[in-house]
Image (spheres, rainbow, N blue to C red):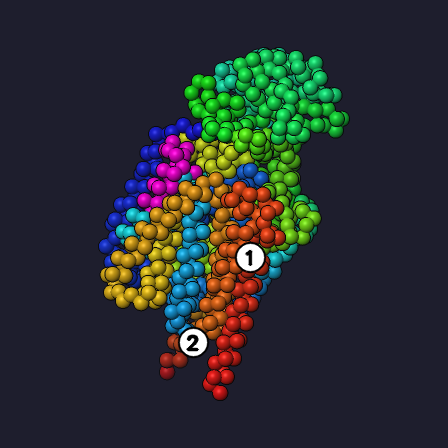
């Protein structure tokens, strides 16, 4: 889908960025010393810190990724919400108060409080960098995704823009400006997500009569695109047009998807189908060739040579109907066709049409009117939704066609776990598939309390009580937001505004289905969402480089002023690395990538942190070994996993040498085991030497 | 007071771990149970998911309240000690 640039959206976006930059410049003078730059002098009020926790934590993955996953697959995206929030229980009951008590600037400070070991500083510093870089990738990808529709700029420009603004925020005022940007972002995100959810409930669900809808839209849609249903299609027997959106309350997409049939017998020798197709600009069915053979798709070509793809559905009586699909073809010469025409918005060009609707409501109703929070789920449970899964077919010449096709799905199926490719393992008979799910949920539970950019926020408040109170405020804000993700995701699924090739745009496009102003504000908030989280990550990385690596390991002696200067330089370098990775990983779902960051964080940091707090026999060597083994094993597992093979290397998933993709269930216990074994061995050795 | 607070943290953590573990195991090994609609026509998956989020918020607030009342007790005890 190619989005028209909205001047209003640009104005709101520029306003948000300007406020952020002015705030950072204003606060710059408060961050001249290390204590100010890295920890805001420990003077942030606990309530502000709590909302800033939400601003820090509710990243692009939470807002864009989860909403997108729910919009595309249903309940499965909510599993991330549940896991992400559960991790805060570990943060509150296990690490919050000790972190504040033991540390000063970085996560390594707390680990090293008892030992004063350069080795621990080095290991924790490297792990902080690794986790932060992993976490930065999806944030930057999300930034690029947002800027495309908002400003009409290419993906890479969005990534560079976010990188530049964040570097400015972090370099000017460090933790002081980062905290206030996160506070503002957290508050705005909560307020407008609430507004969006209320609007979704107020609008209710709609499943308009298709023929009536077509009649009302046909004059507007005719001639806007090559494939628009026209009178010829309506006149054709057995031809039904399905609206992309279906009610006056929804902003119409202006496109009506067509259906033909049902037919009996061989489609390629069916006179009735041939007549129907002939009525569609003289179309004829094409015999399937190459990768199209044996698939659920057929193609037709009209008299002008335009190819339309149809998905086939067979009913209980063995009759087959054809339903118009959408395609994106990437030719070997680099050109791109959308629905058979070059991609673009000019005459003779095409773009993907927005999708997502309810095809059937309970008792044949066409509209529900405003719904209550529980009624929303009850009605959806009894309805039927048209989802748009995709399948990619590769031709022998290297060109590929991704087919997006309609899949009517019962609401009860949408609201149950295990329907997305990520969580399909739940319904698999294979043990390793189930283990993959368990592993991810364990990583989400253990990962939050191990994220460096979250942990350093405990140093920005005055004392342990403030650390505890701010965590409680954070949990309340984050929990409330995650409940809203279910409404926003399902609202997007049924809003008629989904971009079938990009799940990350679901939330902003949902807002656009209400009004252009709301789209502008939500997009700008999503952009600040990225800014807030990326600022925290870059600051955590800069702290790790300056305090943990250069000072402790490199042996650099720095005064306070030099320390801040080096941290600012490190921020610029990490920012540039983040920009590069954000461009490289453009195609990946942001939630998926964040799952990996959680696995690495939980495997590398949590065993050391927990054992240090609760096992007196923990030794320096044990802590170092646990961090290194946890980090390397989880990274190695991810790089060798089937998901990485398929999504990053472009190789067959089956080529992977690890049995499932999520490492947590193996590498987190491995971290604990390593710490215990190495601590016992090193302790025994020391006792023997003492004897 | 510190040991009471630690015990409380452990109990809250164990309770939540049980709730979360129950959800994950149910979704993994008996996913069909998640489709049951025990109340108000809403399925168990939605109820349990919302319940876990609600439980986290309630337990966090309860813990905060306990800690606050502990601190008040401690400050009352301290003021009694200095009274003649």
Question: Is residue A576 or residue A3 the one in the foreground?
Answer: A576
Whether residue A236 is in magenta: the answer is no
Above or below residue A234? Residue A491 is below
Question: For the view shown, which residue lies furthest in the right direction?
Answer: A317
Disc 2 packing (10 Å; few <14; some 14–19; many ≥20): few
Q: What's the CA distance linking mark 2 and mark 1?
A: 46 Å
**Callout 1: SS:** helix
Residue at (40%, 49%) from the top-left corner?
A533
Q: Does the rendering let one see residue A44?
A: no
Residues tagged 2 and 1 counted as in contact (Cβ below 8 A): no
Subunit ID for the residue under disc 1:
A
**Callout 2: SS:** helix
Q: Which residue is mark 1?
A: A664
Label 2 and label 1 in one chain:
no
Q: Specify the segment rendered in magenta.
A: A145-166
Above or below residue A405? Residue A237 is above
Above or below residue A89? Residue A340 is above
Residue at (60%, 15%) from the top-left corner?
A283
Q: Which residue is mark 2?
A: B77
Disc 1 packing (10 Å; few <14; some 14–19; many ≥20): many
Q: Does the rendering let one see residue A508?
A: yes
Whether residue A164 is in magenta: the answer is yes
């Amino acid at each position: 889908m190619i989005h028209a640039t909205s001047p209003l959206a640009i104005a709101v976006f520029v306003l948000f960025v300007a406020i952020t930059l002015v705030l950072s410049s204003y606060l710059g003078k408060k961050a001249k010393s290390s204590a100010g730059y890295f920890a805001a002098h420990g003077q942030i009020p606990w309530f502000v810190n709590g909302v800033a926790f939400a601003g820090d934590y509710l990243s692009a993955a939470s807002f864009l990724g989860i909403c997108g996953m729910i919009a595309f697959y249903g309940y499965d995206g909510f599993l991330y919400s549940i896991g992400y929030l559960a991790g805060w229980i570990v943060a509150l009951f296990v690490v919050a108060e000790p972190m504040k008590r033991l540390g000063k600037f970085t996560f390594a400070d707390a680990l090293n409080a008892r030992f004063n070991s350069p080795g621990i500083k080095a290991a924790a510093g490297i792990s902080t960098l690794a986790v932060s870089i992993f976490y930065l990738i999806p944030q930057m990808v999300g930034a690029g995704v947002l800027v495309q529709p908002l400003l009409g700029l290419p993906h890479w420009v969005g990534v560079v823009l976010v990188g530049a603004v964040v570097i400015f925020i972090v370099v000017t005022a460090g933790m002081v400006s980062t905290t206030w940007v996160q506070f503002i972002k957290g508050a705005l995100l909560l307020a407008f997500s609430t507004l969006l959810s209320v609007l979704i409930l107020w609008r209710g669900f709609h499943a308009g009569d298709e023929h009536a809808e077509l009649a009302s839209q046909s004059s507007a849609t005719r001639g806007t695109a090559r494939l628009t249903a026209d009178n010829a299609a309506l006149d054709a027997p057995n031809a039904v047009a399905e609206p992309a959106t279906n009610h006056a309350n929804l902003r119409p997409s202006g496109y009506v998807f067509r259906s033909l049939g049902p037919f009996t017998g061989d489609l390629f020798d069916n006179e009735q189908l041939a007549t129907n197709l002939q009525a569609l600009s003289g179309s004829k069915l094409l015999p399937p060739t190459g990768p199209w053979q044996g698939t659920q798709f057929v193609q037709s070509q009209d008299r002008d040579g335009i190819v339309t793809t149809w998905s086939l559905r067979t009913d209980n009586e063995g009759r087959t109907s054809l339903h118009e699909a959408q395609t994106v073809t990437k030719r070997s010469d680099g050109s791109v066709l959308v629905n058979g025409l070059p991609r673009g918005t000019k005459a003779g060009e095409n773009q993907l049409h927005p999708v997502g609707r309810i095809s059937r409501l309970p008792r044949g109703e066409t509209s529900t009117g405003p719904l209550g929070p529980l009624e929303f789920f009850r009605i959806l449970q009894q309805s039927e939704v048209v989802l748009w899964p995709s399948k990619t077919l590769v031709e022998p010449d290297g060109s590929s066609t991704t087919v997006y096709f309609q899949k009517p799905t019962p609401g009860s199926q949408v609201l149950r776990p295990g329907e997305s490719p990520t969580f399909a393992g739940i319904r698999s008979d294979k043990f390793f598939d189930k283990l993959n799910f368990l592993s991810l949920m364990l990583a989400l539970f253990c990962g939050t309390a191990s994220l460096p950019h979250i942990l350093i926020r405990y140093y920005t408040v005055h004392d342990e009580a403030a650390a505890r109170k701010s965590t409680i405020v954070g949990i309340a804000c984050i929990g409330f937001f995650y409940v809203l993700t279910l409404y926003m995701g399902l609202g997007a699924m049924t809003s008629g505004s989904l971009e079938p090739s990009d799940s990350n745009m679901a939330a902003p496009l949902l807002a656009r289905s209400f009004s252009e102003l709301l789209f502008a504000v939500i997009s700008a908030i999503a952009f600040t969402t990225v800014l807030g989280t990326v600022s925290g990550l870059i600051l955590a990385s800069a702290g790790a480089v300056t305090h943990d690596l250069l000072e402790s390991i490199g042996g650099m002696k720095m005064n306070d002023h030099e320390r801040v200067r080096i941290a600012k330089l490190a921020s610029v370098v990490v920012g540039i690395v983040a920009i590069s990775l954000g461009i490289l990983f453009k195609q990946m779902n942001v939630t998926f990538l964040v799952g990996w960051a959680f696995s690495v964080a939980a495997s590398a940091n949590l065993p050391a942190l927990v054992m240090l707090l609760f096992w007196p026999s923990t030794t320096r060597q044990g802590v170092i070994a646990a961090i290194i083994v946890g980090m390397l094993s989880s990274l190695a597992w991810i790089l060798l996993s089937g998901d990485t093979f398929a999504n990053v290397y472009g190789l067959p998933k089956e080529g992977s040498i690890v049995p499932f993709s999520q490492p947590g269930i193996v590498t987190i216990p491995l971290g604990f085991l390593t710490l215990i074994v190495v601590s016992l061995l090193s302790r025994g050795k020391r006792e023997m030497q003492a004897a | 007071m510190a040991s009471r607070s630690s015990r409380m943290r452990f109990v809250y953590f164990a309770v939540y771990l049980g709730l979360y573990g129950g959800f994950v195991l149910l979704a993994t090994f008996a996913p069909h149970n998640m489709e049951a609609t025990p109340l108000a026509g809403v399925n168990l998956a939605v109820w349990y998911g919302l319940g876990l989020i609600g439980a986290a918020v309630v337990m966090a607030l309860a813990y905060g309240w306990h800690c606050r009342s502990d601190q008040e007790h401690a400050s009352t005890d301290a003021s009694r000690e200095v009274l003649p």
